[in-house]
Amino acid sequence: MNNNSINRKIFELVDCVGAIEKEDKIKQKKEIEYVNKVWDSLPSEKMQDTDRTLLALVMIDICLEINDFDTTEKWIEIYLHKQTYKPTINYHWGVLAFHKGDYQKAYDLFKEAQELSNNRELDEDPKYLDFYQNPEKYIK
């Protein structure tokens, strides 16, 4: 399979996942299983395709919606492959910790991400920014 074929397959998977109805949790789980199966069958060159991040972000969101944290972790690792920017790395692991209810860990990761990014990492995520600014609402 060449790089163009891998890229086409990744976009097919993005389209597949993007069409999932959010209200249908059973269908979401089946589609996630399908995407994981196809992804796993692709050659290792898939990790060099930068468009994998598009698929990973969609998969992360869907997996978080249904509390499938193991699969979320897999797709965070795919998204962050070769990522060296610590604020982004901490942000994604912080999001996972937040959804798992590990608020102290999430806060610590978000705090470091904010400090390293001059308070910019959480700017586009009001839910996580509110958590960071008001941890007492979550951390008891």
Image (cartoon, rainbow, N blue to C red):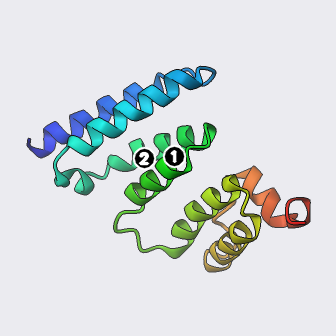
Residue 72 lies, in percent from the top left, at 51, 50
Residue 95 lies, in percent from the top left, at 63, 57
The relative height of residue 19 versus residue 37 in the rendered view (above or below) is above
The relative height of residue 55 versus residue 139 in the rendered view (above or below) is above
Q: Disc 2 marks which residue? A: 56
Quick one: 33 or 5, which is closer to the camera?
33
11 sits to left or right of 25: left
SS under mark 2: helix
* Mark-to-mark CA distance, 1 and 2: 6 Å
**Residue for point 59% across, 20% down:** 24
Give the residue type at disc 1.
Ile
Q: Disc 1 marks which residue? A: 60
Q: Tell me whether circle 1 and circle 2 mark residues in contact (CB < 8 Å).
A: yes
Which quarter shows the N terminus?
Answer: top left
**Residue for point 75% across, 64% down:** 103
The relative height of residue 34 versus residue 133 in the rendered view (above or below) is above
Mark 2, Cα crowd under 10 Å, few <14 / some 14-19 / many 20+, is: many
